[in-house]
Image: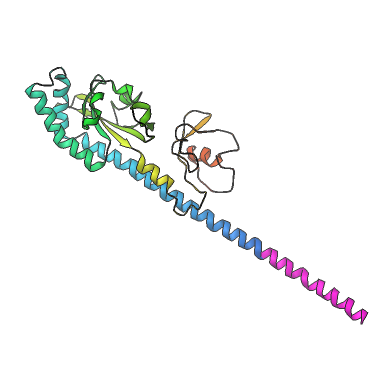
Amino acid sequence: MKIRTKLFFVFAATAVIPLLFIAALTFYNAKDSLTSSITTDMENLAESRAHNIEFFLNTLNDDLLIAQGYYNVRKNLPVISHLQDDKNGKDYIASKTQLDEQLQLFQKIKGFADILLVDSSGKIVYVSSSDHASEMGRSFNDFSSGAFEAGKSSIYLSDPYRLSDIKNVDDYQFGLFAVSPISDLSNKWAGEIVFEVSLDKVYALAQDPARLGKTGEAVIGKKINDKEVIIINPLRNDSDAALKRKVFVGDNIGIPLQQAVANMSGSGITTDY
């Protein structure tokens, strides 16, 4: 009996070893398969959201191309620029009325915060939103440094900004300026048209929790110099992060964001921001 018992334990131990090997192999195969599946899903999700944001920005570009060709704007921008000191005059009122009829409707359809016209000196001479009447006569550079110069010759999209940085408001909405040069009817540069655009839609695309689980998120960043990448959108656990929180180039933290602003793509497991 003793011999048979010893033999039984030997045989039993011998049988357990391949079972453990198979179980371990199954576990690691399942782990790799799950990791691969999640990674693929995240790659597809990131690509989809990037595409949607690019579509939003491309639509802005198309809207500017349309607006810069408006006969109404090309005709009346020089008029209201010339008559800024005679706002009660018949010619000024007629020109402003014509602009209001077109641009206020365009603003409403597109959901812009405002549409501005800027004269050749950089001064704001028209706003489509009556809520922004206090901006009339001010330099556009007061709101977006460098945008006026950049918009003289081509379409330009400014860096994002906090509305609370330039207006007396209590919320933390974000926006950007989309700028295009305007020529008068003789094809001479007369100034610029500016869309003031809320970034709520863009941030909603980035922050949409669908398919991201309890902790996942999409992050938008911009390289501001050779050493820093600034986070542009609010974060899931830090609503005040946009335009404040940074990742430093060369650190082992935030590598995906560093690679993204360097026009690299890929996937893997690393430390987040």
Residue depicted at x 51% and y 51%: 214
The outermost residue toward the left is 90
Measuring from the top left, give residue 75's x and y in whole percent.
Answer: 13, 28
149, 2: nearer the viewer = 2
Query: How is this picture coloured?
Result: rainbow
The outermost residue toward the top is 85
Residue depicted at x 57% and y 59%: 34
The outermost residue toward the front is 170
Residue depicted at x 22% and y 26%: 133
Q: Is residue 155 visible?
A: no
Task: Assess whether residue 3 is covered by the magenta stretch.
Answer: yes
225, 242: nearer the viewer = 242
Task: Assess whether residue 191 is covered by the magenta stretch.
Answer: no
Measuring from the top left, give residue 140's x and y in whole percent.
Answer: 29, 23
Please state the extent of the stretch shown in magenta in the rendering. 1-25
154 to the left or right of 233: left
Residue 251's quadrant in the figure? top right
259 versus 9 height, above or below: above
Q: Magenta segment, principal secondary structure?
A: helix
46 to the left or right of 6: left
